[in-house]
Image: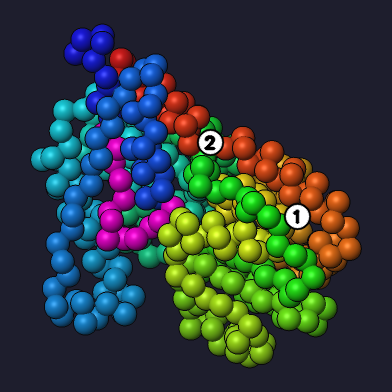
Amino acid sequence: MNAEDPLRVGIVCDLLEERWPSMDLVADALMRCLPDVHTPRIEPVRIRPAMPRWPAALARMSRLRVAVNANRYLDRHRRYPRWLRRHHGDCDAYHIVDHTYAHLVHELPASRTVVTCHDVDAFRALFDPVGEPRSRAFRRMAQRVLEGLRRAAIVACDSVATRDALTSHGLRSTRLEVIPLGVDPAFTPAPTVHAADGPALLLHVGSTIPRKRIDLLLQIFTRLRAIEPGVRLVRVGGPFTPEQRRMAATLGVLDAVDVMPTLERGELVALYRRSALVLMPSDAEGFGLPVVESMACGTPVVASDLPVLREVGGESAAYARRGDMEHWVEAVASLLAERRADPARWAARRAAGLTQAARFRWDRYAQRMAELYAEVAHG
């Protein structure tokens, strides 16, 4: 390779069939931004096989969790590694954009591979087997993924909190770098601010996995409806689980909640802009991208008081104690009252959020990643 030639970097993506939008977002941002990095020059190559269509019998069983998980395991841990051995190409460096695919390090030159770690959920059964009991087969799978993470030349963490969690669980010998994610430039405030005299719209963006605390979100919303008549909740990220839907019906709020699928970027921007507040009552996060996306659109955030969310939201977000419904209701009701009664303070809150969100840019993320690629490519 000549000194003038760009570094060929294989961007090892999540399988498209898994429809994991946050991970696709990282890969897409790198593919878009890396060609604009001038020092070092990078030629990104997307690496991702297309998985075979499910057999008809399995497709008919697709609502059964066991069938979905079995096919997912085969795609991730059998078909993808086998394909990668034959097709990864001759790249100078590789970047696995999702730590749950770190087992793929075993199929790549580990000394030239970077892995991004977003959180430690995938390894919790190994780190805390009592609190996170799993089958022996699951633990073996998680162990292989963790071994791949350990073998990588560099692990890039989204946050200091994720880096510290890995360090506390024994990854001290692995080089860990903190590189925060970015916010797409499309996330901007509306030209005009919506009037604050109508019913407020509250927004939650994310999945329905347990740590997102949809149960707490529904309880908070139920209490708020008694304080703020007409308030509505929009949840983006797919349907409720059956248990969550039953809970919403039992609480009497099912008709006041709009449940939406994962949205295209433009639709999500419009929804952030229309919302009075974004709520993020999670028990744990690896970064908390909706916090900065919301603030970039000029919408204030109330988030669980977690170190990682304080790291991302800074002094611009409002925080409520994790799992404390009363504190959450008090915090949200106070901000909705401020929105109506104190426009100047509300405008200052929005402006502070815009300033905080501006710290997170994909071009900066790509520049820092490019520097790591150059390090591992040159030994």
Q: Residue 119 location, x and y as percent?
A: 50, 48
- Indicate the quadrant containing the N terminus: top left, top right, bottom left or bottom right: top left
| Circle 1: residue type | Tyr
Residue ID at (41%, 48%): 25
The answer to if 16 sits in the magenta stretch is: yes
Q: Which residues are magenta?
A: 10-22
Up the image or down, 229 lies above or below 74; here it is: below
The answer to if 97 sits in the magenta stretch is: no
Q: Residue 288 location, x and y as percent?
A: 58, 51
Left of 39 or right of it: where is 296?
right
Q: Which residue is mark 2?
A: 361
Camera-side mark, 1 or 2? 2
Q: Which residue is mark 1?
A: 319
Category of crowding for the residue at label 1, using alpha-carbon neighbours closer than 10 angstroms: few (below 14), some (14–19), many (at least 20): many
What separation in Å lies between label 1 and label 2 (alpha carbons)?
23 Å
Circles 1 and 2: CB atoms closer than 8 Å: no
Name the secondary structure under disc 2: loop
The part of the image, by quadrant, that contains residue 279 is: bottom right
Left of 339 or right of it: where is 303?
left
Q: Residue 91 location, x and y as percent?
A: 21, 27
Residue ranking furthest to the top: 3
Name the secondary structure under disc 1: strand
Up the image or down, 289 lies above or below 246; here it is: above
Residue ID at (25%, 40%): 46
| Circle 2: residue type | Arg
Category of crowding for the residue at label 2, using alpha-carbon neighbours closer than 10 angstroms: few (below 14), some (14–19), many (at least 20): some
Residue ID at (85%, 51%): 345
